Amino acid sequence: MNVKWKTSALMDDIPLRYKFLIILLGVLIPIISINTLFYLQTSKNAETREQENLQISVERAGYDFMQMVNECVAIGNTVAADRTLNEMLDYNYADYDEYYENYDNVLRDRLRQYSNLHSYILWLGVYTTNPTIQSGNSYFVLQDSDKNSEWYQKIAGSKEKVLLTSYLDTNPMYPNQKKVYISIIRKMDNYPGLLKHTKYLRIDLRLDSLKELFAKERDYMTLKLIDDKNRIVLASDQSHDDAGDSQLLSLPVESGASGNGAIKDIIRPLGPANYTQGWNLVGTPERKDISGELRHILRFILILALITTLIPAILFVVILRSYNLRVKQLYKHMKLVNYERFETIHMYEGKDEIGGLLRSFNMMTEKIRNLINDVYKLEIQKKDLELERVRAELNYLQSQVDPHFLFNTLNAVLVICKKYKYEQVTDIIRNLAQILRRLLSWKDDLVTIEEEVMFIEMYLQIEKFRFQDRFSYELDVDPGLMKYRIPKMSIQALVENSCKHGLQSVKGARLIRIGIHRSYEDLIITVEDNGIGMNKDKLDWINRNLHSDDDTGKNIGLRNVYKRLKVYYDGQAKLVIESDPYVRTAIVIQIPLNQVQAQAGGEIHV
């Protein structure tokens, strides 16, 4: 309970505009956070989608390339299984005429048919150690220069029958230059009886055909073909053609390398076959396309964030201005009340609860000004005794317009408005308006006990609203006394005195008991609270000043009540104060019933 009270008090100390600012931040921060998370997630999804599309592009290019390689491997298997070809290449010819006769009859078109059927094959031929054949066209005798070449050393030193290899070799168009080759090398050793001479089938691929494959994906990425030595053999952003300048693309590439952007390079192994082991196809995405899509997403998120933050901000500013201006005006004029300046608030009041409070305040100030004017007239026209009575009443009424009570009530109304969305405010506003209206409209000096009790109960309900569960009250009234008439607000002044002075500093539960009973020939009115009470010295001082004619400026409420009781009941009414510090304080009024009945019958004793 203490923590709750301290938290509520802390909030009550914060100015209204800062409270609205806190609410605004409480709304805008989640909106901005949600938009930020939405942008991050959308960007991540876009990158993931782009990564998947690029993966598909790399897979497509890799699949097409492997189709070429596998078809070449199949051609190599077919050639290696051609027994007639193997026999003629393994045969030792007696002279050139015998070789050329067999060449014209069998060998000439034996291999050419494959290169004619497949446009991506640059050259297809056999190298053999048989010295009796004549090098030319598709058949060559292995020379020392061939044995020193990279492709020969790879196949000769390998246990595999088929190899996919890249290397530099002499450019036949420009013998002084080297050229990059991608070839499938096949050992021709299918027949054990035909191994007199070593034979190798070499199938060279057209690099421009591979470039055409890579060009299909040019809009999405740059493709690089990496050999088993981790060298760049071919890249889609570099020029390679069969007749061009030779160059060795030997830039090292780390496995798993990624690009500079959020989307990484995609590395696809060419396949599980032994001859493709170590070969990879690497796709580097085009950053400009990805950056453009991310900029589009960011622009959309910024527009969405602007809309979702600007509209609430404008609404909060409008609402804050509506409340803050009116509350500040009300606060300013209520401070003027302390200096006995009852000025009307001139502004549009509105139809909400604050507007109702402004109208009640204006009505109150108008009534008070009229009452002040009436008092000045009475000072000239009436007797000293009546003038003293009216002054006492005016002082009493002014003492009731306690700005602290209005301020506390207003703060409580504002807190509940924000916390419970106005659901509990209606009755309190109605009670406050009725109290102010009755306070300013009561004309008769005497009211029935029933009217006084109703007025007190409305006042206590407001106090209950202020202190919530920490305040309670009990009314115990004899029903047979309801029609008796007593000076107006005589009991209410005692109740307010208990709330203001007795219960204000109590931290625990606050309780007020009001009892109205008949005791023999007397009317007994008791107002009791469990507040801080008074010690004996202070109690004696109050009793002395209560019966003194000297105006000390203190205990105005009690003095007003006591003076009015003396006036109305010929000095026969008694007012007694009892107090036990921090336990009980009681104010008891004792009035002879014959005096009360005489007033009810219309006989005024002054």
Image (cartoon, grey):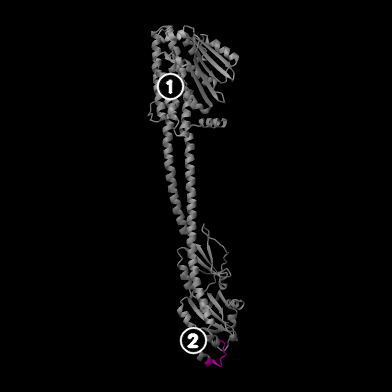
Query: Does the magenta portion include 509?
Result: no
Amino acid under label 2? Arg
Q: Is residue 58 left or right of residue 158?
A: left
Q: Position of residue 153 (x, y in %)?
A: 60, 77
**Foreground: 537 or 513?**
513
Q: Which mark is residue 108?
A: 2
Q: Quadrant of the N terminus?
A: top right
For label 2, the SS is: loop
Kindly indicate the quadrant of the structure image that contains residue 422.
Answer: top left
**Location of residue 149 with respect to 591 vertically, above or below:** below
**Foreground: 414 or 285?**
414
Q: Residues within 10 Å of mark 2 (few under 14, many from 20)?
A: some
Q: Position of residue 91 (x, y in %)?
A: 56, 89
Query: Does the magenta portion include 94?
Result: yes
Residue ID at (47%, 82%) = 113
Contact between marks 2 and 1 (CB within 8 A): the answer is no
Q: Which mark is residue 435?
A: 1
What are the residue bounds of the magenta stretch? 89-98
For label 1, the SS is: helix
Q: Position of residue 193 (x, y in %)?
A: 59, 86
Kindly indicate the quadrant of the structure image that contains residue 165.
Answer: bottom right
**Location of residue 593 with respect to 582 vertically, above or below:** above
Amino acid under label 1? Ile
